[in-house]
Image (tube, rainbow, N blue to C red):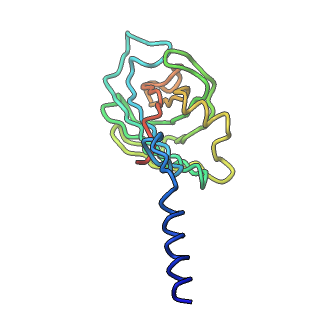
């Protein structure tokens, strides 16, 4: 019996050691996709040079494809006035215009956000990304716009930033 167990164990080691390891993929994708973007007045379409802002915005997001949850931060500073609203736009390259795909937030006069702030939120459950939305985001066809008191009725808002895929979890 001992001889049989030694033989079986040895055979198991032999079979296990014959498996080849796939080294063609340089990363392990655990379903996390990272996105980033930087916004400025110069990216707003149409660009309004006469009243251009020096405000900037930074976007950072992580999409978990297993749970279908998209967490993101949108930070800004140096805007000309308080923030009245923010939108995501789906289906446009840099320099192009798309219709608002998702309203990030809208504020009334009593709850305007500061000219420098970090907004954190999540898209999940009923508002999760569709397959087409995710594909467009992977291809850089999403952007965000931030509207302020001074740039509330101007098409494009005060700052705009293209959202780009930056990598997988490694």
Q: Is residue 163 above or below residue 45?
A: below
Residue in the picture at 63% in, 25% down = 99
- Measured as percent of width and height from the top left, residue 36 is found at 42, 36
Q: Is residue 14 above or below residue 139?
A: below
Residue in the picture at 67% in, 38% down = 131
- Measured as percent of width and height from the top left, residue 133 is found at 63, 35
Q: Residue placed farthest to the bottom in the image?
A: 1
The front one of 166 and 170 is 170
Q: Residue placed farthest to the top in the image?
A: 50
- Work out whether residue 112 can be spotted: no
The answer to whether residue 89 is left or right of residue 146 is right
Residue in the picture at 54% in, 83% down = 5
The front one of 136 and 21 is 21
The front one of 146 and 139 is 139
- Measured as percent of width and height from the top left, residue 60 is found at 42, 41
- Work out whether residue 86 can be spotted: yes
Residue in the picture at 55% in, 16% down = 96
Q: How many marks?
A: 0
- Measured as percent of width and height from the top left, residue 81 is found at 37, 31
Q: Residue placed farthest to the front in the image?
A: 3
Q: Split into 4 quadrants, where in the image is the N terminus? A: bottom right
């Amino acid at each position: 019996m001992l001889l049989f167990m030694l033989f079986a164990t040895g055979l198991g080691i032999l079979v296990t050691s014959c498996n080849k390891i796939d080294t063609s993929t340089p990363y392990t994708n655990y379903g996390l996709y990272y996105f980033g973007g930087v916004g400025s007045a110069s990216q707003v379409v149409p660009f309004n040079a006469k009243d251009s802002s020096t405000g900037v915005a930074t976007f950072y997001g992580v999409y978990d494809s297993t749970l279908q949850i998209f967490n993101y931060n949108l930070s800004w500073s140096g805007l000309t006035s308080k923030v009245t609203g923010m939108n995501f736009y789906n289906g446009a390259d840099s320099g192009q215009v798309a219709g608002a795909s998702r309203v990030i937030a809208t504020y009334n006069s009593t709850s305007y956000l500061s000219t420098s702030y970090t907004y954190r939120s999540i898209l999940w459950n009923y508002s999760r990304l569709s397959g087409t939305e995710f594909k467009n985001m992977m291809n850089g066809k999403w952007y965000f716009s931030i509207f302020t008191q001074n740039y509330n009725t101007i098409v494009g808002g005060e700052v705009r930033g293209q959202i780009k895929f930056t990598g997988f979890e490694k």
